[in-house]
Image: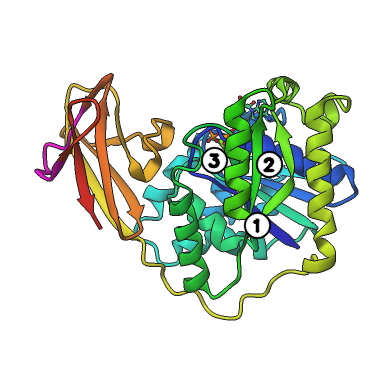
Amino acid sequence: MRIVSIANQKGGCGKTTSSINLSACLAHKGRKVLLIDMDPQGHSSIGLNVNISKLKKTVFDALWDSNDAKVVLDDVTIRVDDNFDIAPSNISLSTFEQHLSRVQGRETRLKEAIDGLNSIYDYIIIDCPPSLGLLTFNSLIASTEVMVPIEMSLFSLQGISRLLEIITLVREKTGHEIRIKVIATMYDKRTRIAKEVLQDIKNHFDDSMFKTVVNTNVTLKEAASFGRSIVDYDQKAKGFSDYLALAKEVIAEEKVLGIGSVKQTKPFPLPTLVEKQFFYHAPKANRVNIVGTFNNWNTSEESLMERKKDGTWAKRVYLAPGTYQYRFLIDDVWVEDQNNSYQVDNVFGGKNSVVEI
Ligand SMILES: Nc1ncnc2c1ncn2[C@@H]1O[C@H](COP(=O)(O)OP(=O)(O)OP(=O)(O)O)[C@@H](O)[C@H]1O
Ligand SMILES: [Mg+2]
């Protein structure tokens, strides 16, 4: 079984589109595929017509070992098509980090859930959230491979080195190989910048990049909005031929890689991610986000802080050693950390707070 995380902490680079359509194309070519939605936004689930607000069981239940009857991953999966199942998620998954903050072995929950699967799959594709938190960490530890979609636009390489560092960390700590391969996405051949970025990325990643380039194609967006994969929606679309070509490339690798599972030989030591709590006292605020270089300044649901009774907002994040800049977004106002005097100037004429791990 090949277990593939589709990961990049940068938002909107095509993780979900690639997860859905690569999975669908692999199934179309006769492989048995499970797509695991590891994003609390549930975009893979929504994109395959799952009504995520009505779900009784989600990936969260299979990861969270409650006192009630144990839910396993097989209990959660929903049939999408012949050969194609999905394990859906919704916002409940965003509480995973809080629930497991003090639990030993929290990084290996997804791996254990996959090891416990009764159904047989050739491929497990994991759609990761746009951050490098515990959910992505669980996905990487469970994976034999990571595919990194990179959008062909300016700044698209920003943050990639951080992801590669984390993968190297997982590789060292777990003792298992994780193969990394880049997928060029949203390529618009009419623009010069796309050509330049593609060339840049080819130079940089060389063999660790798929030859298939996924073009910008509005039918991919349209298919998702109708809750269908491109296989199901329009096989005449460019998006279909691109993802089918990608699937064929992936399948051709089976000769080299095999599709046998990679057995873990060493027990998992705890990785050196450091737990860091952030606080901001704002009793009148309706919403507080913590945003910074650790999540690519992304203000998605995952960056929301939790309000305590006394009006303090708190958020625990897990960071690899390094230096990070951050700010809080209080309703619509950006502020620096009132509890941290270490600040640097930012390009907007204000200050960013800095934390060293
Ligand atoms: N090849 C493409 N052509 C046109 N639109 C695309 C393509 N790939 C992705 N999109 C669109 O770009 C947006 C972002 O894509 P997608 O949701 O796959 O990114 P993501 O990396 O999963 O985002 P997030 O980080 O929020 O999870 C979506 O609206 C999607 O429909
Ligand atoms: Mg996504």
Q: Could you say where residue 96 lies in the image, as x and y percent from the top left?
A: 45, 48
Query: Position of 244 compared to 193: left or right?
Result: right
- Whether label 3 lies within 8 Å of ligand 2 gets the answer yes
Q: Identify the residue at the far left of this view.
A: 341
What's the residue at 52%, 69% (across, down)? 171
Q: Nearer the viewer, mark 2 or mark 1?
A: 1
Q: Earlier in the sequence, mark 3 or mark 1?
A: 3
What's the residue at 82%, 32% (across, down)? 240
- Whether label 2 lies within 8 Å of ligand 1 gets the answer yes
Q: Earlier in the sequence, mark 2 or mark 1?
A: 2
Q: Amino acid at mark 3?
A: Asp
Location of residue 2 (image quadrant): bottom right
Q: Amino acid at mark 2?
A: Ser
Residue labelled with disc 2: 19
Q: Nearer the viewer, residue 63 or 214?
A: 214
Q: Nearer the viewer, mark 3 or mark 1?
A: 1
Mark sitting on residue 208: 1
Whether 123 is drawn above or below 172: the answer is above
Q: Amino acid at mark 1?
A: Ser
Label 1 crowd (10 A; few <14 / some 14-19 / many >=20)? some
What's the residue at 39%, 41% (across, down)? 295
How far apart are labels 3 and 1 at the CA level? 25 Å
Query: Position of 138 compared to 114: left or right?
Result: left
Q: Earlier in the sequence, mark 3 or mark 2?
A: 2
Q: Which residues are magenta?
A: 335-343
Query: Position of 251 compared to 198: left or right?
Result: right
Quadrant into which the C terminus falls: bottom left
Can residue 94 be seen? yes
Whether 234 is drawn above or below 14: the answer is above
Q: Could you say where residue 174 lies in the image, as x and y percent from the top left?
A: 52, 72
